[in-house]
Amino acid sequence: MEDKVKYEMEFPIQASPSLLYQYISTPSGLSEWYADNVNSRGEFFTFIWNESEEKAKLLSKKNGERIKFRWLEDEETPYFFEIRIQVDEITKDVSIMITDFAEDDEVEEGKMLWENMISDLKQILGSS
């Protein structure tokens, strides 16, 4: 199995961190922008897109700040994806920070996917 490459992205977003947290940490919030539908049972989340279904384990979450998942297919690996809310202490600007992993030749595709999903989230929030 090929090693995956870690990549990070930052998306400025005009929304309150508490509202944003609802969209990144709850099945109903995630199903608004991340997947067509999201279900959870305890620490296991099922993400559904069209006919495909992926399961992930919730690794950690910090209220109002971040959520971190590992796909079950990557269970024996160090790979994860994390969605984090960052607030600049001085300007109070809010950003969403994404940490994810992809195979070398899929990093650009992964970044484009995140850009599209965050764009959907911004539309839902009425953020520019």
Image (cartoon, rainbow, N blue to C red):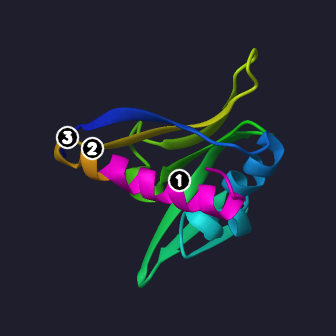
Q: Amino acid at mark 1?
A: Ile
Q: Is residue 67 left or right of residue 9?
A: right
Residue 9 drawn at (x, y percent): 45, 35
- Whether residue 41 can be seen here: no
The residue drawn where x is 16% and y is 46% is 105
Q: Residues within 10 Å of mark 2 (few under 14, many from 20)?
A: some
For the record, the magenta segment spans 110-128
Q: Let me know if residue 108 is in the magenta part.
A: no
Judged from this view, the residue extending furthest toward the front is: 128
Instruction: Tell which of 110 and 123 is nearer to you.
Output: 123
- State the mark number for residue 80: none
Q: Amino acid at mark 3?
A: Asp
Residue underneath mark 1? 118
**Could you tell me if the residues under marks 1 and 2 are in contact, i.e. CB atoms within 8 Å?**
no
Residue underneath mark 2? 107
**Mark 1 to mark 2: distance in Å?**
16 Å
Residue underneath mark 3? 104
Earlier in the chain: of badge 3 and badge 1, it is 3
- For the residue labelled by badge 2, is the local secondary structure a helix, a strand or a loop? helix
The residue drawn where x is 63% and y is 70% is 31
The chief SS type of the magenta part is: helix
**Could you tell me if the residues under marks 2 and 3 are in contact, i.e. CB atoms within 8 Å?**
yes
Instruction: Tell which of 32 and 54 is nearer to you.
Output: 32
Q: Nearer the viewer, mark 1 or mark 2?
A: 1
Q: Is residue 7 left or right of residue 21?
A: left
Q: Residues within 10 Å of mark 1 (few under 14, many from 20)?
A: some
- For the residue labelled by badge 3, is the local secondary structure a helix, a strand or a loop? helix
Residue 11 drawn at (x, y percent): 53, 39
Q: Quadrant of residue 78?
A: top left
Residue 112 drawn at (x, y percent): 34, 52
- Whether residue 85 can be seen here: yes
